[in-house]
Image: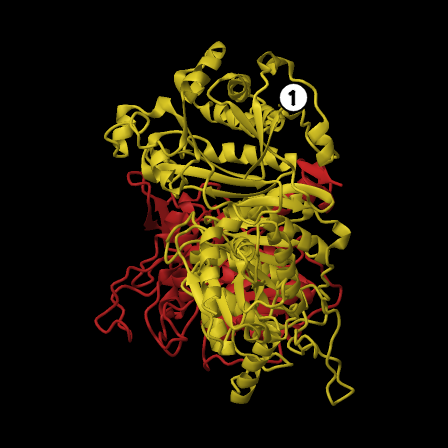
Chain colours: A red, B yellow
Amino acid sequence: MPGLSGVPTTEVEQKKKDFTSDQEVRWCPGCGDYAVLASVQGFLPELGLARENIVFVSGIGCSSRFPYYMNTYGMHSIHGRAPAIATGLASSRPDLSVWVVTGDGDALSIGGNHLIHALRRNVNVTILLFNNRIYGLTKGQYSPTSEQGKITKSTPMGSLDAPFNPVSLALGAEATFVARTIDSDRAHLTSVLRAAAAHRGTSLVEIYQNCNIFNDGAFEILKNSDTRDEVLIRLEHGEPVRFGVDAEHGIRRNPSTSGLEICSGDDPNVVVHDAHASDPSRAFALSRLADPGTLARTPIGIFRQVERPAYGDLMNDQVDRAVETQGEGDLATLLAGNDTWTVE
Amino acid sequence: MESATAVRGWAQGPGQTKAVSGHTTSERARDGAIDQEASHAVTAKQVRELDRVVIRFAGDSGDGMQLTGDRFTAETASFGNDLSTLPNFPAEIRAPAGTLPGVSSFQLHFADHDILTPGDAPDVLVAMNPAALKANLADLPKGATLIVDTAEFTPRALKKVGYAASPLDDSSLSAYKVHAVDLTGMTMKALEPFNLSRKEASRSKNMFALGLLSWMYGRSIDGTVTFLQTKFATKAAIREANITAVKAGWNYGETTEDFAVSYEIKPAPMAAGRYRNITGNLALSYGLVAASQQSKLPLFLGSYPITPASDILHEMSKHKRFGVRTFQAEDEIAGIGAALGAAFGGALGVTTTSGPGVALKSETIGLAVALELPLLIVDVQRGGPSTGLPTKTEQSDLLQAMFGRNGEAPVPIVAAASPADCFDAAIEAVRIAVTFRTPVFLLSDGYLANGSEPWSIPDVSSLPVIEPDFATEPNHVSDDETAPAEFWPYLRDPETLARPWAVPGTAGLEHRIGGIEKADGIGTISYDPANHDHMVRTRQAKVDNVDVPDLEVDDPTGDARLLVLGWGSTFGPIGAGVRRARRAGHSVAQVHLRHLNPLPANTGEVLRRYDRVLLPEMNLGQLALLLRARYLVDIISYNQVRGLPFKAEELADVIMKEDEQL
């Protein structure tokens, strides 16, 4: 897998428990974070990496406790800065598999700047963005992904802010891998993780995650078997974009606006999803289908997956090239410079 | 100052001071072939010997005054004088032409003996326009030499800075030795063969001025010719024009009756060794590269451009062949964040900034304190608060470095004393960071950053070796001896109190660290009150425990009652002030603090040894506050925040006044 090339592997068979630390997990009972943790711990053995070469870096928030529960190297850092810290680590240590665990407040509010710059640089890290559309750790204020008008402790008359769409944001920030998945759909979550880990460069995985204390049921419409088929659009590379109980709806291009619109599932113009398209505009248009208020027409899956050199690889190439063309540095020569005089 | 009169022959002319490596000073002074091109002008002019000179080049910020100063400095360094420089320029890249705020200057003090400062007042002012004259005239003592470019003294330019009439035409400059010279006009004339535009040709006037001053003070222009050949290697016309201008300036001095005397300043006696001239930012950069080599830790610099620290980022980015990785981050926070991430991975993590950047990095410095990882924060201080005076110097970040974080977050602090000392201070700061697993502040300032002095190039084998001593195996066996050995990330070295540095990739040592309080030893999250109290005290004890050398007081007569104390870049001016006071018959002791946290163990004893302690600082008394609180000594502060280093004479006055009261 290109995303993990250079990371040492092991022949020893690994199990979920090998990635489980001895620390008691302290999320609220029923939190969606448990499902994500179990999925990640269950998925990592599949990669066959030397456990000591895996690092989880997090910021602040409920999700950011994640590293403590992983039996790998880990750093629980400060609010919003995990992408910056991971950038230094990943670009100076290409032999590591570096993961960032963050939330909607951590990544998109206080850490928004670091997120977009990690994406544009294409640092070789996988970012798991747990989006529960609420501030959980500080007990229930609205977040940058909360729907407008949301009543919370800090917005008794409703929030005024328009929410971010994290997928649209990432695509606008030159991201090379952008996906969305849901905490409760383990098979889908695992398949997205697999692709994200395989990708060289920054992989952004938005995970809809339920906060059962402060924003319970935020994604219920996407999870409930009575409603989900009508609102959830599953993106598969190379497949027509259809949804509905019997795939009776489709997505096609509106020739007059060049935007996307809903059509009948058997419309001959239903678009075929191309996650590898170099032009991100189709992926962006797909990301705009979702209604930020109701979550109707929410696509999940991999929106974009394209190749571009990873930041650390470019940085290390420059170091190698400097040594190749100029030779290894000699300290005495450097200190002396070209303009000296001698006193005897 | 003038000590002898002699007639100078060609031995001091241009062309004889071949650059440089391997020639001894005395050889270079003797060695000499006649420059045939200039030899038509041989006139036996008077040569006076001086022991020291201060020259200030001043002009518009687009006039190339910094380059002119740099070149004169390079030739002066090669010649073997001791020297010290003070560049002074506006924050605007191109302030409106001909205005007072747009004036840029470069002051150089050079001597036949050891000197400590760039000089209080110029002996010679070169003013390229009325604004430069007006902005600098107040600093010029009576009797000093003034060289002005008459071409720029037009009614419009005069009016722009508020001169009703040209000061060259009335008696307002009668106190000075004025040389009103058409520098621009003569430059244009000399460059006629090159078919340059008026604008292009006139741009070489700074090189004409450099040539003239080089003649006046017996400097070679060879190095400058070589410099121009390299700089304009692909631009033949510009190259030849500038070379012609510098030679024309030299020849003008040699020929004209206006300059009847030239001066000789003999090389200064210096300790044997190989020397180069170096600025603080360059020395600091080299110190970082050296520390990386001496610790065998790959250096990762995370930085965001900020004056006056950016040159360190520029310099470090040239040294990839040493394994140096430089990262220009999206902001100050990401700069230090990436450096800390790299440190977690086993790199020498460094971030470089100035005061406003430190403010933004505070939270990450606190995280590094909690993580107990090595990290170097370089603060090249400038005038504050807020944006303050970006291009000017100040020492006002001491308390920010000391306390500017939430919680009890002690950080060792090292402050460089001179431009060349930035090299050693950088290595020392890295040694502390790596040995004690802690973030460390290295304080420089705008004066050190851009100022320069001769540097005795150290022998690499004499540099300290820094041992990272990475953890490689489990360090804890539980009571149940059948259980496998564990790795405890906060199990400390009993001597240094440093925790083990186990980097990812080391099998069996997987661990998690973070900003939440940890149980000492095992390193898991702990909210236990007793543990937190213990950890806060332990982190403080670790910093207090850093091995720093005792203060050594300079008290030559042994009977001084007044101690003058300083830290950082005031070392030179205080030393010069103390020398003056001693020459005037005062017994004065001097001591300098290089380690600000922890303070040397004998600090209290030294302070109490004297009847009075005087502490000049370029802030409102920050170190005085710390020392008074800690040692209950009634320190007398002398403070200035003018964006400029102290003047030696002014400090001498203060020192003598304090001494006289005893």
The residue at the far left in this view is A157
**In the shown orientation, is residue B98 left or right of residue B398?**
left
Q: Position of residue B421 (x, y in %)?
A: 61, 53
Q: Position of residue B228 (x, y in %)?
A: 57, 25
* B70 versus A224 height, above or below: above
Between A163 and B464, the one nearer to me in the picture: B464
Q: What element carries label 1?
A: helix
Q: Name the residue under label 1.
A: B10
**In the shown orientation, is residue A60 left or right of residue B369?**
left
Q: Which of the 4 image quarters holds residue A233? A: bottom left
Determine if residue B154 is in view.
Answer: yes
* B648 versus B403 height, above or below: above
Q: Position of residue B624 (x, y in %)?
A: 46, 69
Q: What residue type is labelled 1?
A: Trp
Q: Position of residue A335 (x, y in %)?
A: 68, 44
* B198 versus A257 height, above or below: above
Determine if residue A6 is in view.
Answer: no
- Total labels: the figure holds 1
Q: Quadrant of the N terminus of chain B?
A: top right
Q: Which of the 4 image quarters holds residue B218? A: top right
Q: Which residue does the image show at 55% across and 58% down from the upper left?
A: B585
The chain carrying label 1 is B
Q: How crowded is mark 1: few (under 14 residues within 10 Å), some or many (20 or more)?
A: some
Between A91 and A169, the one nearer to me in the picture: A91
